[in-house]
Amino acid sequence: MLVVGFPAAAFDTNCYVLAPGPGGECVVVDPGVDVEAHIDAVLSEFGLRPVAVLLTHGHLDHTFAVTPVCGAHGIPAWIHPDDRRLLEDPMLGVSEQSRAAFHGRLEWTEPDDVKLLTDGAVIELAGLQFTVDHAPGHTPGSVMFRLPPDAQTHQPVLLSGDVLFRGSIGRSDLPGGSYEQMLQSLATKVLPLADETVVLPGHGDATSIGAERAANPYLAEAVPLAGPHRGL
């Protein structure tokens, strides 16, 4: 599997391009601020054609370029219904300070084609299989995307958005956030994953479930529910 990740021009938000390999279809995840040129460079370098944009949640730093990217390639954007309104008005998800910085206004149009994600759904795009895990807490509609083990590395992959970072988790003090829901999501959707799972977060460096299980203080607060181990 080909995975190319790079930070957006603001907020250190990671955008990812995923494909089975060079020379075919791909998926773009979380196109943030001013990533269009970088995405085009990746597409040109590897001979890729995007078929969809996947959004881990509706915050502006992850969706800023979703409409131009979707429009340029005639592709849909996928988002959880609980964050659908943030594609209509991104100001609903930002702090009062951020709203003031934008004077409460933002020139914004949502993508022409918006598709909705459901918890547990398996979506096949560009020859890749994404399992959707609804994991509220950072936003009501936050999701993570799981991919099965790669044939070469034999490691599952988790696109964790702003649910799980290296050594930390996403903030829960913005509109729609809930720390209690975040801990529940960590307990039910993160802790059951296999240690060898590679974590590609919405901000910062890649990590693994095993590393975070051992050192992330927030995972220590999330008590897993009783039940069988759910690996990938």
Image (tube, grey):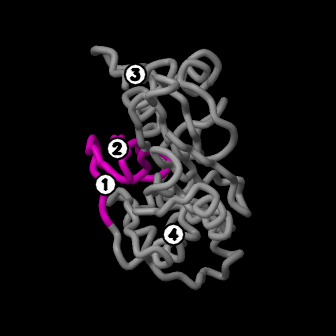
Between circles 4 and 3, the one closer to the viewer is 4
Q: Earlier in the sequence, mark 4 or mark 2?
A: 4
Instruction: Specify the label residue 117 is tagged with.
Output: 1
Please state the horizontal and vertical placement of residue 134, each as a whole percent of the image: 36, 44
* Amino acid type for the residue under numbered disc 2: Val
Up the image or down, 110 lies above or below 33; here it is: below
Q: Residue at x 43, y 43 (%)?
A: 144
Q: Earlier in the sequence, mark 4 or mark 3?
A: 4
Q: Earlier in the sequence, mark 1 or mark 4?
A: 4
* Amino acid type for the residue under numbered disc 4: Val
Q: Secondary structure at mark 2?
A: strand
Q: Give left or right: position of 37 versus 57.
A: right
Q: Earlier in the sequence, mark 1 or mark 3?
A: 1
Residue 40 image-quadrant placement: bottom right
Q: Residue at x 48, y 36 (%)?
A: 158
* Amino acid type for the residue under numbered disc 1: Leu
Between circles 3 and 2, the one closer to the viewer is 2
State yes or no: residue 103 in magenta: no
Please state the horizontal and vertical placement of residue 181, each as a whole percent of the image: 42, 39
Q: Residue at x 45, y 44 (%)?
A: 20
Q: Dot 4 corresponds to which residue?
A: 66
What residue span does the magenta drawing correspond to? 115-143
- Quadrant containing the C terminus is top left
Choose between 161 and 174: the one closer to the eye: 161
* Amino acid type for the residue under numbered disc 3: Pro
Q: Earlier in the sequence, mark 2 or mark 1?
A: 1
Q: Quick check: marks 2 and 1 in contact, CB under 8 Å?
A: yes
Q: Dot 3 corresponds to which residue?
A: 192
Q: Dot 2 corresponds to which residue?
A: 132
Q: Residues within 10 Å of mark 2 (few under 14, many from 20)?
A: many
